[in-house]
Structure formats: C-alpha cells, structure tokens
Image (spheres, coloured by chain):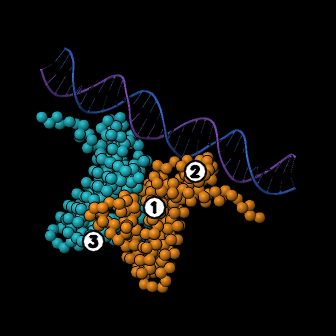
Chain colours: A orange, B cyan, C blue, D purple
Amino acid sequence: MSPRSTAEEQRAKIVSRAVAAFAHAGYHATPVAEVAEAAGVSPAYVFRLFPGKLGLFVATVDHCYDQVTATLVKGGEAAGPVSPEEVLAAMSAAYMELIRDRNLIMLQVHAQSACDVPEIRDAVRRGVARVVQAVSRVSGAEPGAVQFFMAYGQLCHLIVQADLGAVDESWARTVSAGISH
Amino acid sequence: MSPRSTAEEQRAKIVSRAVAAFAHAGYHATPVAEVAEAAGVSPAYVFRLFPGKLGLFVATVDHCYDQVTATLVKGGEAAGPVSPEEVLAAMSAAYMELIRDRNLIMLQVHAQSACDVPEIRDAVRRGVARVVQAVSRVSGAEPGAVQFFMAYGQLCHLIVQADLGAVDESWARTVSAGISH
DNA sequence: CGTAGTTGTGACTGATCGGTCAGTTACTTA
DNA sequence: TAAGTAACTGACCGATCAGTCACAACTACG
C-alpha cells in the first residue's frame, strides 16, 4: 500500500519555508543552512531531498507561482460573471492582498533577477506563463488589458522592493498612487 | 593647482566597467575580482579606491541611473514642444533603445532585488526619484501618465530578464506586445 | 640626488558556503 | 527480537571571496 513516505512531506515543508527564507536576500545570498534552519532540519538533509541548492530554489519558485496563480484565479472567480475589466480589477485587488505578505512578491523579484541561471529562467517563464494564461482565461480580457495588468503588477514589485510606501515625497506618491497605502 | 589625480579617472573607469560586470549576475554573485579584471586593475586596487564592495556597487548604481535619466531627458527633449503624451512616447522610444544594451536595465533589476541592503535601497530610491522627476518635468504629463510610463518600464525589465522576446508562445506575445521585437 | 607622496600589486588570511559521507536513530515487518 | 530499511545528522572538505598589508614603481619637487 501507500508507503506514505514522510520524505515527501518534508520536501513540501522545506519548500514552503524556503519561500520566506529566499524572499529576504534571494538565491545567491541565502545559504542553504538558513533554509534548513527555517524548516527545522539539518542542511545535510536538504541536500539529500533536493538535487542541490539550485533544485531547491527552482522548486520553491514553482511553488511560489502556484500560490500566486491560485490567488489570482480565486480573486477573479469570486467577482462572478461580470465584465472582463471588473474581473481584472478583482484580480488586482487579490494581488494587492498578496503584498501584505512580502514573501511571495519578493521571491518573484529574486527569481527574475537570477534569470542568468538557465534553470531559474525557465522556472520564471513557466510561472509567468501560468499567470498570464490564468488571467487571460478567467477574465476573458483582451491581450492589451492583460499586458496592462502585468505591467502594474511589475510596478508593485518596485514599490515593495524599495518600500516606496514609506517614502513621503512627491515622486514616490506618483509611483505608488492607488497601489500602496 | 589641480593635482589632476589619476585616481579619480581610475574610479570613473572602474565604475563604468562595473556596470556590465554587475549586470550579469548581480551584487551578491559578482566577485570584485571580476570587476577589477574588466577594468584592467588588480582587485586590491579596487578596494583601495572604493570603501568595500558595497560602496563600489552603490557608485555603480548611481552611475547607471544617471545614464538612464540622461537618456530619457535627451529623448524627451528631442521631441520638441509637443503634447505631454507625445513627449512620453518619445521617452519610451529612448528607453527601448536602452534595452538593446541589456546592461543598464539588468543593473537596475539587480539593484532593485538587492534592496535588503539599506545602502542599495537608498541608491535605488535616489535613482527612481531622479527618473520620475525628470520624466515629470520634461514631459509635463500628469502623475497618472507618469505612473503608467513607469509601469511599462518595469514590464520591460521582466521581458529583458526572462528574455521573453525569444519565446514564441501566445502568453509571451501578450506580455511583450509592442515592446520587444 | 634624496625624499616625500601617490599609484599600483602580489601574496596572504579569515570566514563562509555548497556539497559529501559515514554513521546513528527510529520505524516496519516477520 | 532480529533484520531490513528509511529518515536524519555531525563532522568534515575544497573552493571561493571580501578585505588587508607590506612592498614595489613611478612621479614631483627641493
């Protein structure tokens, strides 16, 4: 019968904790030991469950985009059968809710900036593909509107990264108007 | 009179070469030795001219935003006295010209993702401030239009990072429509 | 020529980190 | 309880890298 291996559960737990760990300083600046500690296991065991640090990071990025996509779909479907623009607005609201926990957004940012590593670039492409397809499908909006949605999503990344919400100057308000609060 | 120190010239040369060096792998993944080699000096001398790796990176980021701002201003002023929307369009075209050389755009991305380091975050804020102020001033556009400009600029970053222009799929075309070619 | 200052470097160090491996604990099955 | 297997770790290794320092080379000036 199902051997019900606990290793799989540990893998899931490590990936889940790795989101927050990698979200702080990114791929290159986060030691595996830090992820291991956050997951409550030894560094050696992490290397046993994942094929190297890169494999761990890629799994974490995939997990991250899964959550983002799920959040957007959920937010969009909750809007009910309305116009594409209203669905996109609901999805925007759902995405902004994600910002309250910086982890998912920061991990995306760090994954994007580590795209020099081919495996990470592929993971980012997979993730963006899933997001774009989900947004297009659930909203039914035309490509231009979806592109607009993605553009303002990327603007959110800048705002969160540099914490522009905490800057009380004119230029910062111009950038974050209607987004951070 | 002016001691005409060559050290200052070396500093400028190192910063200029450091843009390309850091643009590849970012702050944490780029050894100072790599920057030194690109500049044709020894690593030890780089540490002598700059207060540590962090100081070098911050100087490089400042230099990068200087160039970006100058390019945007130049592009916008070349449009002549037309409507704000047309000036913004000219600036967009100028910014897209920057994409041909990935270096400036990639360095911005890496600087943004290293915002955990306070000094780097401050450099990014300074840079974004200069860009927003320059765009607002030269174009005379209202804040909403400037925000829109910045959002599509950030979208460019995603496209360049993941090299979406090289992906021939529907979702990728949705994201890069009218931007990459 | 001498000496003071500036440019520049080779050689080193202390610390960190990815990855390995031998071995130990704990659970299952007969 | 004996044997087998899967979960898990401490201790270690080799490589990399930021930063230092004593010293060389060149120039400026008296």
Task: State whether residue D4 is above or below residue A9.
Answer: above
Query: Which residue sits at x=48%, y=60%?
Result: A103
| Side of D13 where C7 appears, left or right | left
Q: Kindly indicate whether the residue at mark 1 contacts the one at mark 2 (C-beta within 8 angstroms).
A: no
Q: Indicate which disc, 2 or 1, sits on the residue closer to the N terminus.
A: 2
| Side of A3 where B39 appears, left or right | left
* Residue under pointer 3: B145
Pinpoint the chain carrying mark 2: A
Q: Nearer the viewer, mark 1 or mark 3?
A: 1
Task: State whether residue B92 is above or below residue A78.
Answer: above
| Side of B112 where A19 appears, left or right | right
Instruction: Name the spot of residue B111 as percent of width and height, x first.
Output: 36, 53
Disc 3 from disc 2: Cα separation: 45 Å
Three-letter code, disc 2? Ala
Instruction: Name the spot of residue B125 as percent of width and height, x first.
Output: 31, 56
Disc 1 from disc 3: Cα separation: 27 Å
Tell me the SS state at disc 3: helix
Three-letter code, disc 3? Ala
Query: Which label is found at residue A141?
Result: none
Image quadrant in which the C terminus of chain B is located:
bottom left
Q: Are marks 3 and 2 on the same chain?
A: no
Pinpoint the chain carrying mark 1: A
Residue A163 is at least partly visible in this image: yes
Three-letter code, disc 1? Arg
Task: State whether residue A159 is above or below residue A71.
Answer: above
Tell me the SS state at disc 1: helix
Query: Which residue sits at x=30%, y=59%?
Result: B128
* Residue under pointer 1: A102
Density class for disc 2 (Cα within 10 Å; few <14, some 14-19, many ≥20) is: many
Disc 2 from disc 1: Cα separation: 21 Å
* Residue under pointer 2: A36
